[in-house]
Image (spheres, helix red, strand yellow):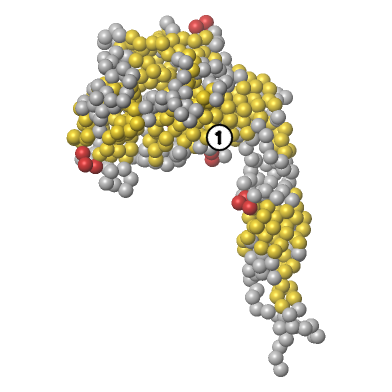
Amino acid sequence: MRRIAFVLLLVAAVAGIHACAADAPTAPKPGGGGGQSSAISVQLFASDANPKAGTCTLVEAIVTLNGASVPDGTGVNFSTDFGTFGENGLPLVTIVTTNGTAVAALCGPSAGTAKVKGTVTIAGKTNSGQVNISFQGEGALPFVTFCSPSFGPKDGGTPVALNGGRLFGTPATTRVTFTVNGVSKDGLVTSVTSNAVTVTTPGFPEVAAPSALAQITLTLGTNLPQPVVLSLPNCFSFGTTDASTPTVTAVLPSSGAKSGNTRVTIVGSGFASSGVQVFFGTVEATVVSVSFNQVIALSPPAPFGEVDVTAPVTVKNISSGVVSNGVLFTYTPDMHITAIANGVQSTDAPFTPVTIYGTGFQAPVVVTLAGVQAFVQSVSATELVVMPGIPAGCGAGGAGSVVVTSITTGETATSPSGVSFTYVVVPMTVVSLVPPAGLSGSPVEIDGSNLPTSTANAQVLFGTRAALVNAASATALSVTAPPGTVTVSPTCVGTDPAGTLYTVETVPVSVKNLQNGCLVTGPPFAYQLPCVVPGP
């Protein structure tokens, strides 16, 4: 349940994203050996490159094949080396494309930098893109709002000011790294003030394109135990474009409900801080915030309430009248669940994927089955594929609703009457101990049903002392009896010879499945010690 609450915080986190340092793509690496193909282009964007620790940010992959959007349903494999994806709580998730885009939610539990990679394989050819996201610690943090200038020649030598606030350090303790097409080079830091870091750009003579976006990583306090790292993926390009010309590169998300009011992050450059207008088609949207490389707007309703229609997103600089458009936003139906497949599963067997059918699904989403969070494997507009989670406790499970929640908008769809998911709960039992008595350190087999199937998930206690679990299956656990509390050998009685085993204490044996918290107590175990004959 804690994971569900953490993921659902993303709705509030996205709503409160700071307008500075909006994220943008690392340009895809050129094709070549190892199955790479330049025909496939993968560009990664995020709604916030520097979110606070404990929150989440949206990561979008825009995928093209030979310059055109890939077919709907193309799988994008997202991976990260820090944090987890909100859809499944894992560092890996696969989302399928809609209109050439796929969106995932990355959540960072603490301060740290995540390298997020999106990989696509089509007809045996593979390509990928990457974006860096730096989760920030608590307190008033440094930030960068824009680069001045935002463009420079590929030969380098351009003085660039990274303008922001609460910056600190000296040129010697500050590092600025430029990454273009997967190649990283350090710039020369010449000055650091509280409001700006000035750096001279390195050269990238190998760049052949007329304009190449550079992902900048700014590290403050390199002499500190925990330097502050900021990711600036859309701040500077090597090229000749006029910095006053607005350019729309991507919108996150690229689709939303027909009723409108979807919070959309428009990523690009050249947006006038003095004011912009945003249009979806011919309808003006509400602008929430503006920075040089990011505009946040609320989508207007779809024209005439239509769905599955696209509208070009246009940004107009009010002061100059210059406009930029060409990136499309798609209006989708409201979310509805119509049916599910594989909706009855037993807790004593491996789970298999569940398919949820409906309309209006839009990644990223959180899915619960009978109140238990599932692991999202793929998302398309009409179909979700998820893996059931494990119900907590011995009595958890049974039948319940299927609920899909959009992380982006907070919209929720609940399965209609007659459509539900059922956990067939097989209780855990401990039937017998073989042998039921023995010395400390003796091997003991615990027989039962629905026992933990891995040693890592099995906790066995003899009284209050933990036993070593050597092997585990659903019907038997092999353990080593821990030391007993009685260590003094008893006195032999009557004619019993020395060494006769006497029971010196009896303790309950309990088994706990650490994966779901289920705890049961089985038959007791009798500790024995050899008796001794008293002296004359």
Foreground pick, 433 / 14: 433
Q: Give the amino acid type for the residue marked by disc 1 in the picture.
A: Asn
- State the image coordinates of residue 230 (x, y, percent, origin top left): 33, 34
Q: Is residue 340 visible?
A: yes
Residue lying at the far front in this picture: please name it.
33
Foreground pick, 18 / 229: 229
Q: Identify which residue is drawn at 74% across, 73% down.
A: 503
Q: Identify which residue is drawn at 64% across, 65% down.
A: 482
Residue lying at the far bottom in this picture: please name it.
536
Q: Is residue 359 above or below residue 175?
A: above
Relative placement, left or right, of 268 versus 440 is: left
Please state the total of marks drawn on the protein image: 1
Query: Which image quarter is the C terminus in?
Result: bottom right
Q: Would you name the residue on which mark 1 appears?
A: 88
- State the image coordinates of residue 258 (x, y, percent, origin top left): 52, 13
Relative placement, left or right, of 470 versus 144 is: right
- State the image coordinates of residue 323 (x, y, percent, origin top left): 33, 9
Relative placement, left or right, of 388 versus 259 is: right
Q: Is residue 8 visible?
A: no
SS state under label 1: loop
Q: Residues within 10 Å of mark 1 (few under 14, many from 20)?
A: many
- State the image coordinates of residue 86 (x, y, percent, origin top left): 51, 33
Q: Identify which residue is drawn at 28% across, 25% down.
A: 205
Residue lying at the far left in this picture: please name it.
191
Relative placement, left or right, of 434 versus 105 is: right
Query: Which image quarter is the N terminus in?
Result: top right
Residue lying at the far right in this picture: please name it.
495
Q: Identify which residue is drawn at 64% across, 35% down.
A: 388
- Residue 366: image quadrant is top right
